[in-house]
Structure formats: structure tokens, C-alpha cells
Image (cartoon, helix red, strand yellow):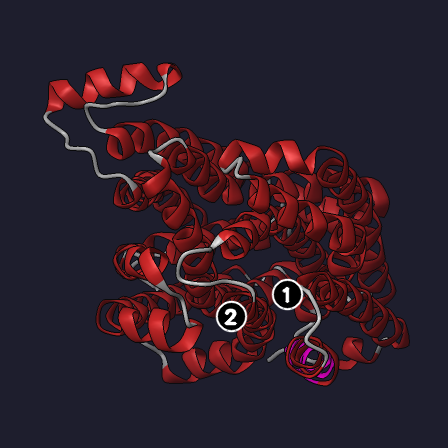
Amino acid sequence: MRDERSRRIVEGRLGWEMARFGAPLALGMGLQTTFNLVDAYLIGRLEPEQATPALGAIGICDQLAALGTIVSYGMSVATAALVSRRQGEGDAAGMRRVAWQSLLLISGLSVAFALLAIFGARTLIFDVVGAKGDVATYSVSYLRVLVGGSFTIFLLLHLTTLLRAAGSSKTPVSMLIVANVANLLLAVVLVYGPGPAPPLFGWGTALASLLGIPRLGLMGAAWATLIARFIVLLPLFVIVVRRFELFSPSLPRKPDAVALRRIASLGWPSSAQLVVRILAMLLTHSLVARAYTTATDQSATVALGIVFRLETMALFVALGWGSAAQTFVGQNLGAGQPRRAKSSGWYASLFNSLMMVALAVVYRVWGESIVALFDDEPRVVDTARSYFAWVGWAYVGLGTGIALGSAMQGAGATRQSLALDALVAGCFQVPGSLAVVYLLGAGYTSLWLVVALTYVAFAAAYAVSYQRGGFLRTVLA
């Protein structure tokens, strides 16, 4: 039997139900990025000799941390496809089995990435990214804490994905709001300690003095993020357990090799697809660090770190609409309605495009002022302004590709979406970026143009492939 949420998804007015379901998810995923923005703002208020390299460090570490998050999220996407399909079929027992096995898988990934961060941070920062100076030194310590505690973000995204796949979109948003409030309060206390701090945050220094908390700076931001996420995990886990009855006596507790392989087989292309995108961003960051910075002038790296944090807002909002598309496609396919399933992806793409246009306008018009909130050094602001001028308009393309790709994943066509991403990145973005930097010796604005055209190419590739509808022939076991 389907509950009221599922009936609306498979029977209600499609455009209205997609808007009602997807808007909270887009908001919730957008809120996820405010963890990083809050940290960047608070760190930017530190003394200049600390603030500038720290901002460069978080820009690099965000992308490295995102690799682990994306691998985990790919497994969550696979789980969502399986859960939503079984929800559409009315198979409650099947939903619970998939949910429990996926929880075991995500827990294992958390341990693996924690070990990688603890023992491999220095190699990643110095040898892979090529960071220099204080930026590199700060990055190593920050990465060890942030990724060492990656179980908090892995489980947070996974549990909210389970709720979304079952048809709930408002509970995940409320949990993320609580997490962001907790992050702000904790970060003020841990970053500034007993002071000094901007007058607006004087309450935090008084509290830190009372509790004997030292001034932790950049590392305070990392610990605040982990603690805030952990606080939210506790009630969220209770909600998911009650919804899916994960500890029901009738539910097999041991790892099921067949089920785990099924989730991994379906999930690794989703993970790999998003890793391709993050690696492309890391390539851009690495090229900027190697070609446009020196040990004494890190302004280009700092600027790119800030704009990538702001661009992550576009990425996560698009993932929110994509998550809605996954749920609608999966449940409608489970209900035997392939035409409605396909239309769901187009609606999600339309609503997402409207939000991308609004975000692009905000960054284009007020981008300089927004960047100056984090670092008002003229060279940093000017570099960031040029990025938004060239790339901001292409966020519509970025969002379209993500929304339609997520809809394909909802049908289980994860390999198809991976192939499209790899094709665009491998045949256009990577060679184009290397060419403008090393063959043409061009300035960074030419690199920004390559990024913008890549986002347009993503949209075109996905639109053509999605319209052909081959993904609808995918059958989930």
C-alpha cells in the first residue's frame, strides 16, 4: 500500500507536485553549502596573515573532502533508486532491507576515507594539488580533521536521502537548518576563542572565556562543522529507524553480499560521475595554483577558493532538484508509468533552471560585494569578479546537466550518466584547460571560458540523451 506522499508523486498534478517536493530539497541542499560559507566568513575576519592562507586552504580542502562525500553520495543515490522503486511497487520489506544494507556500506566507506585523510593528507596537498606556502601547511591539518570525521557528512546525506526516497522532503530540510544554526554558534566560539573577535561575535568570546576554550582559528571551523553534523545525526537516525524499522527483529542484520554488490554496482557509476566533476574542478584549481600564483602571491588561489565555495551553492541546489527527479522517476517507474517518469526529469530541469538564472544574476550583480565579505584584497576580488562574469551565465547549463543526469540515475541508468560526464570532461574540459594554460600561455580568463563552455556542453549532451529515452529501458533488480 502506498502512503499519501507516494500517491501524490505517482498520481498528483506532476508540475505542482514536483515543485512542492523539489523546492524544499533544493533549499536543503543549498543550506548544506552554508556550512562552508559560514566558515569562510568567520575565518575571513581573522588577522590578515592568518585569514588569507586559511581561505586558500579551505578552498582546496573543500574539493578534496568533496571527493569522499561524492563517493558516499553515489551509493546513497543508488540506494534512493532502489528504495523509491520499491516504494512505488508497495514493497515495504524490500525498502527496509535495502536501507539497512546501504547503512552498513556507508559506514565502511566512512572508515576508509578517515584512514586516507589521516595518513595521506600531506601527499594530497603538496604532491597532488601542488599547493605552496602557508596555504599548504594549513591545508594538511584542516584536511585531516575534516575528512577524518567524514562519517558525519556521509551519514547525514545518506539518512536524508533515505527519507527523500521514501517521499519525505521537509524533514531533511528542518534537520539541515538545525545543523547550520549549531555550526554558526559553535564556529564563533571555537574559531575566535576568548578573542579578539568582531563586535558582532562578542558573545562568543565571553562564552569561550567562561568555558576555557582556546582560540583555534581555522581548526575551530573544522571541529565546529563536525560537531554540528553529529548533533543532527542523532535525531535524524531515530526518525529513519522509525520510518524504515531498521531494527525490526525480522530484519537481517548481517551484511548481505548480494545486496551490497547490487548497491555498489549501481552506485559506483554515480560516484564516479561526480568524482569526474570534482576532479575537473581540482584540475582548474591546480592549474591556477601552478600557473598564476607564487609562494608570496596566493591571490588567485584564494579567489578561486571563494568562488568555488559560492559555486557549490549552484551545484547543491541542482542536486536538490535532481534528488526530486530521482524520487519521481523511481516511484513512477515502480508504478508502471514510464511517460510520467520521463516528464518528471524535464520539470525538475525547468524549475532548477529558474533558480540557476536567479543565482547567476545575484553573483553577476553583487559578486564583488559578496567576495569582499570573505576577503577584500583587491586582487582577490578582481579575480573572483572575472570568474563570475565568464562562468555565472553557464550555471543554467550546469544545473540542467545535473537534473537530467539525476533523473537517469533514478531509473538506474548510472552508467549512462557517467559516460556522458566522462565524455564531456575528457574530450573537452581537460584538454581545453591544459591547452589554454600550457600551449597558449593565456591568462586565467581563458580558463574561465573553458569552464563555462564545459557547463553548456554538459547540458547539451544530457538533453539529447535524455530526450532519446534509452535510460527508461533500465531495469532495477
State the image quarter where residue 132 is shown: bottom left
10 on left or right of 438 = right
Residue under the point 30% across and 31% down? 186
Residue 130: x, y in percent? 42, 72
Q: Which residue carries the number 2 mark?
A: 286
Q: Does residue 104 appear in the picture of this structure? A: yes
* Disc 2 packing (10 Å; few <14; some 14–19; many ≥20): some
Residue furthest toward the left?
Answer: 212
* Marks 2 & 1, CB-CB < 8 Å contact: no
| Amino acid carrying mark 1 in the image | Arg
Which residue does the image show at 41% across and 77% down from the upper left? 128
Q: Earlier in the sequence, mark 2 or mark 1?
A: 1
Seen in the image, is 332 located left or right of residue 210? right
Q: Nearer the viewer, residue 64 or 448?
A: 448
Q: Against 434, is 213 above or below?
A: above
Q: CA distance from mark 2 to mark 1?
A: 41 Å
Residue 201 highlighted magenta (yes or no): no
Label 2 SS: helix
> Residue at image x 34%, y 61%?
133
Front-most of residues 398 and 130: 130
Residue 376: where, in percent of width, then height? 53, 35
Disc 1 is placed on an element classified as helix
Q: Write down the residue under mark 1.
A: 85
Amino acid beneath label 2: Ser
Q: Quadrant of the C terminus?
A: bottom right
Horizontal side of residue 304 vs 417, given as left or right? left
Residue 222: x, y in percent?
A: 31, 46
For the magenta stretch, what is the residue range? 413-426
